[in-house]
């Protein structure tokens, strides 16, 4: 019997565990390679985990809502279960092994092979782990393979090239036995139930964990926090405990920007296939000012200020559930307005449809939140750790304001907007924070209404 063990994949550099949200299969079900087997959630993002082989599910080792450490075995698949019954074949000499092709998924190792568990700093896809098992590559050897994927990850092409080079003697084989990192043995799931989720619960008489009932008063409704809301609450509390927050405010006349967008939005959508909102225009102004004041694009490590050379702008996005997630536009300074628009729209759509990739919320260096999209004039946002600043933009309103002209002061109807910047006072003083915010407001006020996009 050929058994392959599916382990909880590592979904990011700092993620060491994940919660099983839903099993799509149960023991006895058939599954295809790359077919979604389960849904998991981390403190960053929800994701789907595919099967790493064709076969029959023989065992699910964890139930829904269990928190599982990275690298722990979560399911076992019998890869010979789907093989059709065939007439006995006469014994023949074993054929020579062939290296797997780009289109083929290597078959799982026999269950008698040593268990292969990941626990290092790099993320390995289930397919890479399967190839490593098949080729007898232990964890120490896998860690030495140079990866060409995102953030140095080992791709299928990398490991197959390594196997080929190893067969030619081009790389030294690691023959000494290496102990795999210890992972706590999985607790058995007596009856994992597939196709169920845990909804928010409304209770009439809440009972505490020690069995005593709480008296909340008269006519009340108690709603249990969902998993994401609990994580947001924890993240916000930790941010307040970590950073001494200061918030500065500014006002900007964005009339030129509003009129320009009104003029180009139909042509922009026709030409680029994307609707242009104000968000990419705000991000564009934010990026320009970060280049002038790079200390706002930093983090703090003890008494060391780490100034980030990459400008990765987090974009706070509201989900249909009412929760919040912050996908990141990487290297925003390398994108023109069209590129920023596509990134904003794609990330917002993926977030609302629960299609964000695991690393889509990582490595942000500064965050923008558009509180005006919900009608707020201004906000005092909480810093997204470990960043040191977050910009909030309020709703755009027409108001009568005094403007200066060559003929003297006059009152005109203008499109006005409030901006606010919350910053970490350990790194950013009031003078710098206010100067940075004023620079953004000035950038928006002096928007070139004759520009091309």
Image (cartoon, grey):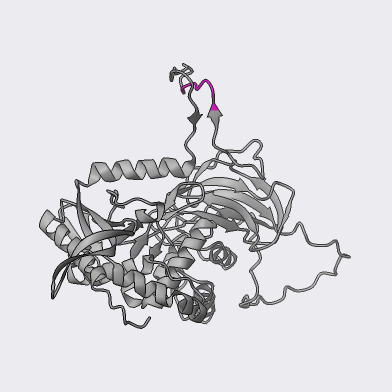
The residue sitting at the left extreme is 431
Q: Position of residue 48 (x, y in %)?
A: 57, 56
Residue 97, x across and y down, in percent = 66, 75
Residue found 60% across the figure and 44% down from its top: 61
In the rendering, at what x and y percent does residue 394 appear?
32, 56
Q: Residue at x 42, y 58 (%)?
A: 12
Can you say whether 277 is above or below 241 in the image? Answer: below
Q: Nearer the viewer, residue 287 or 108?
A: 287
**Can you say which quadrant of the picture contains the N terminus?**
bottom right
Q: Residue at x 26, y 69 (%)?
A: 444
Residue 54 occupies quadrant: bottom right
Residue 365 colored magenta? no
Q: Which residues are magenta?
A: 203-209
| Magenta: main secondary structure | loop
Q: Residue 105: x percent and y percent? A: 64, 69
Does residue 130 appear left or right of residue 148 in this picture? right
Depicted 216 relative to depicted 321: above or below: above
Query: With respect to residue 24, does 177 lie above or below?
Result: below
Q: Compared with residue 43, is residue 138 higher up or lower down, i.e. above or below?
A: below
Please tell me in which quadrant of the rendered image residue 440 appears. bottom left
**Residue 207 seen in the figure:** yes
């Amino acid at each position: 019997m050929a058994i392959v063990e599916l382990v909880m994949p590592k979904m990011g550099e700092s993620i060491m565990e994940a919660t099983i949200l839903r099993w799509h299969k149960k023991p006895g079900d058939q599954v295809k390679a790359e077919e979604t087997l389960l849904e998991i959630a981390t403190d960053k993002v929800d994701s789907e985990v595919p099967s790493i082989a064709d076969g029959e599910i023989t065992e699910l080792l964890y139930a829904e809502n269990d928190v599982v450490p990275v690298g722990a075995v979560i399911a076992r698949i019998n890869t010979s279960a789907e093989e059709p019954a065939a007439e006995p074949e006469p014994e023949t000499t074993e054929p020579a092994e062939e290296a797997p092709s780009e289109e083929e998924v290597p078959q799982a190792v026999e269950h008698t092979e040593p268990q292969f568990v990941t626990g290092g700093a790099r993320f390995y896809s289930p397919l890479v782990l399967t190839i490593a098992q098949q080729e007898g590559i232990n964890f120490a050897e896998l860690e030495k393979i140079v990866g060409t994927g995102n953030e140095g990850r080992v791709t299928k092409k990398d490991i197959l090239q390594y196997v080929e080079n190893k067969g030619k003697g081009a790389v030294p084989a690691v023959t000494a036995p290496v102990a795999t990192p210890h992972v706590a043995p999985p607790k058995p799931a007596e009856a994992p139930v597939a196709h169920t989720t845990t909804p928010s619960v409304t209770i009439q008489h809440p009972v505490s964990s020690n069995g005593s009932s709480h008296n909340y008063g008269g006519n009340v409704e108690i709603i249990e926090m969902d998993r994401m809301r609990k994580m947001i609450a924890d993240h916000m509390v930790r941010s307040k405990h970590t950073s001494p927050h200061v918030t500065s405010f500014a006002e900007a006349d964005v009339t030129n920007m509003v009129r320009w967008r009104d003029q180009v939005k139909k042509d922009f959508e026709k030409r680029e296939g994307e609707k242009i909102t104000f968000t990419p225009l705000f991000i564009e102004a934010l990026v320009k000012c970060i280049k002038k004041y790079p200390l706002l694009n930093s983090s703090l490590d003890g008494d060391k200020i780490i100034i980030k050379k990459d400008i990765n702008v987090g974009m706070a996005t509201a989900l249909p559930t009412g929760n919040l997630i912050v996908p990141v536009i990487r290297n925003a300074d390398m994108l023109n307005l069209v590129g920023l628009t596509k990134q904003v729209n794609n990330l917002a759509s993926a977030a609302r449809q629960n299609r964000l990739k695991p690393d889509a919320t990582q490595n942000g260096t500064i965050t923008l939140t558009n509180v005006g999209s919900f009608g707020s004039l201004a906000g005092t946002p909480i810093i997204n750790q470990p960043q040191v600043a977050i910009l909030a933009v309020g709703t755009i309103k027409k108001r009568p304001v005094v403007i200066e002209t060559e003929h003297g002061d006059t009152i005109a109807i203008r499109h006005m907007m409030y901006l606010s910047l919350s910053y970490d006072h350990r790194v950013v003083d009031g003078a710098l924070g206010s100067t940075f915010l004023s620079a953004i407001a000035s950038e928006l006020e002096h928007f070139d209404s004759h520009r091309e996009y």
